[in-house]
Amino acid sequence: MTIKTYNFKVQIKNNMDIHSEKELLINEHYGLQKDGRISIEQYNKELDEAELEIDRGDFITQEELKKQMKEW
């Protein structure tokens, strides 16, 4: 299974607190619109990426997840 990580360079702009910067980064990464929803384009992109992961076998079953959780 592949785990994706994202590295963001955060540059605090004048008069912008960390919460505003966090919201800005989340909106940019997920393509959120002003109402807090992602765009159709971003939604379709995420679906395409998920389908490719499944095709590559980059997933675990619910049963496998339950087994792993017992080991935590």
Image: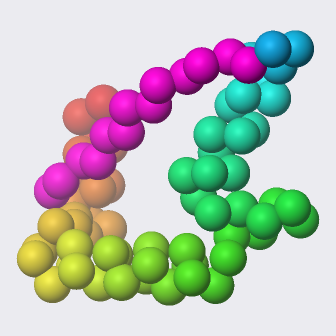
Q: Main secondary structure of the magenta part?
A: loop
Left/right placement of residue 47 relative to residue 41 reads left
Magenta range: 1-13
- Residue 35 x %, y %: 89, 65
- Residue pictured at 72% horizontal, 28% vertical: 21
Left/right placement of residue 26 relative to residue 69 reads right
- Residue pictured at 33% horizontal, 75% vertical: 49
Front residue of 56/25: it is 25
* Quarter containing the N terminus: bottom left
- Residue pictured at 59% horizontal, 58% vertical: 30
Asked if one can make out residue 9 in the rendered structure from this viewpoint, the answer is yes
Front residue of 2/33: it is 33
Residue 31 occupies quadrant: bottom right
- Residue 47 x %, y %: 43, 82
> How many discs appear?
0
Left/right placement of residue 4 relative to residue 2 reads right
- Residue pictured at 68% horizontal, 51% vertical: 27
Specify whether residue 37 is painted magenta.
no
- Residue 58 x %, y %: 16, 67
Residue 20 occupies quadrant: top right
Query: Is 34 drawn above or below residue 16 in the view shown?
Result: below
Residue 56 occupies quadrant: bottom left
